[in-house]
Image (tube, rainbow, N blue to C red):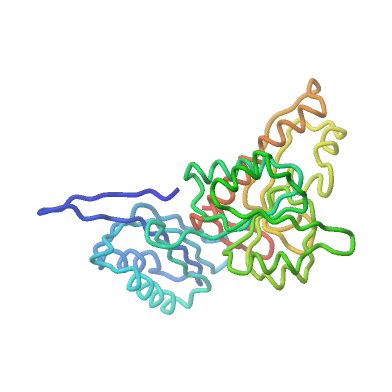
Amino acid sequence: MARRAISTVTGGTARSVLGIHVFHCPDVVGIVAKLSECIASRGGNIRSVDVFVPENKQDFYSRSEFVFDPTHWPRDVVDNDFIKLSKLFSAEKSIVRVPDLDPKYKIVILASKQEHCLVDLLYKWQEGRLPVDISCVISNHHRPPNTHVIRFLERHGIPYHYLPTSVGNKSEAEILELVEDTDFLVLARYMQILSGRFLESYGKDIINIHHGFLPSFKGGNPSKQAFDAGVKLIGATSHFVTQELDAGPIIEQMVERVSHRDTLQSFVQKSENLEKQCLAQAIKSYCELRVLPYQENKTLVF
């Protein structure tokens, strides 16, 4: 989660908050200097700056963390100052986020029968380790009232929507109605392929977890595919959803070593642990503005 800083000044205590800014523009001399000037001129202090300029390309990418006193630099003025900077450099992307002041990202989680990823996200959310608000959980799997997932959701006032699917009906119209006001979606082992029409209608980012080390072992049952192939490393991949199955830009990957002593069952157990960690980290990185689209099918992760 975002760091919080408290600074002491003469005569009392002023609350400093963390700001995050990501920037993508044509590469020219003086961008970092102007970014620094923008923040310093309002009494802010830069904590870190990550910059990436691809080789042989005139593109500039950056992610900055800074602290400031919102009584001296009001939130709306922060936006206006960075808009001016964006226009100055003809930026393609300029986003500012102040986690302590801005609303949390509103998400919906979609899951099927397997619930290890869903349960992990719910508990991390309960512990305050995911900076999101969960609007609801949608599933194509019916869960009886007295199951631990349903009890958890009821205890926290999170609706659960059972939307059955079939070959001819994926309940996508109903899903679109439920996710209309969200910032992004999370597929926590939702074992349905979303149509191109759904992706176009939703129009926002969707983060998926794949229980395999992409681009290897796409599609169904990747643990068995990996086991049959005799691999020495297994992995999990979190990526953005696109119309091409399991081929969207990769956000996060995690691996673990396996050997000839492992069974298919131990492959699956290790894979599930990786999936939980990988999906949670991808969501956290996304919310902290660490993930930027890069080229046609890649990401930068600061």
The image position of residue 115, as x and y in percent, is 70, 42
Left or right, 134 with reference to 232:
left
Picture quadrant of residue 44 = bottom left
Q: Residue at x 41, y 57 (%)?
A: 99
Q: Is residue 211 above or below residue 200?
A: above
**Residue drawn at (26%, 60%) of the image:** 69
Q: Residue furthest left?
A: 11
Q: Residue at x 33, y 63 (%)?
A: 36
Q: Is residue 281 above or below residue 259?
A: below
- Depth check: 123 or 187 in front? 123
The vertical placement of 140 against 176, above or below, is: above
The percent position of residue 175, horizontal first and vertical second, equals 71, 64
Q: Position of residue 114 (x, y in %)?
A: 74, 42
Instruction: Looking at this view, name the residue that lies furthest to the top.
Output: 261
How far across and how far down the image is residue 263, in percent? Answer: 81, 25
Question: Can you name the residue that lies furthest to the right here?
Answer: 167
Residue at 67% over, 36% down: 255
Q: How many marks?
A: 0
